[in-house]
Amino acid sequence: MGDHILVVVNDIEDSMKAVMEAARLAGRDPENKVILLNVFSMLETPIQKSNERIIDLKSVITKKSEDALLKPVAYLEEQGVAYEKLTRVGNPVQEICMNVRFHQCKMLLLSGSPNEELERLKESVLKKVTCPIQVV
């Protein structure tokens, strides 16, 4: 099994820096894989009461995630880097940590301008995973 690198993709412009770094680290080795994770916070997706609304909400999330991943996926394909796309709804820290462990990631890449929210996310994740975290 090669190296897996998890990239949290939420903001398209900031995320591209992390995707490019992940592609560089993974290289063209088919054993290595970049995992693109798009997490929608429960605060962003209020629970709906009717089944119709839940289905509608799921389609909205799916569409938003596909749109966010278009550019990163195109770049990875152009570079010949293996990848996997994941979309999750929940607590971002829990989703990131769970996927780092499940995929046995060797590195986690976060992106964004330095701010308190990004620093809190990094610190919270650092407490729960053993792989290195790089903010790009």
Image (cartoon, rainbow, N blue to C red):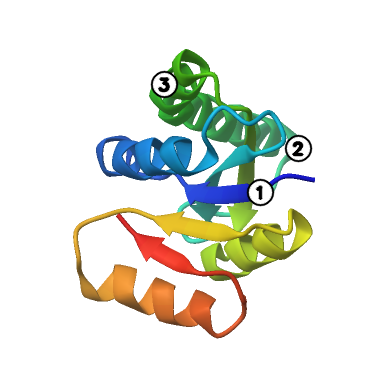
Q: Foreground mark, 2 or 3?
A: 3
Q: Foreground mark, 1 or 2?
A: 1
Q: Foreground mark, 1 or 3?
A: 1
Q: CA distance from mark 1 to mark 3?
A: 19 Å
- Residue that badge 1 annotates: 3
Name which residue type carries label 3.
Tyr
The image quarter in which residue 117 lies:
bottom left
Q: Position of residue 129 (x, y in %)?
A: 62, 75
Task: State the mark number for residue 75.
Answer: 3
**The C terminus is located in which quarter?**
bottom left
Q: Crowding at label 1, few (<14), some or many (≥20) Cα neighbours within 10 Å?
A: some
Name which residue type carries label 1.
Asp
Label whose residue precedes the other's in the sequence (1 or 2):
1
**The N terminus is located in which quarter?**
top right
Q: Position of residue 51 (x, y in %)?
A: 75, 37
The image quarter in which residue 30 lies:
top right
- Say whether marks 2 and 3 touch (CB < 8 Å): no
Query: Vertically, is 116 above or below 69?
Result: below
Task: State the mark number for residue 51.
Answer: 2
Element at badge 3? helix
Residue under the point 68% across and 39% down = 54
The image quarter in which residue 134 lies:
bottom left
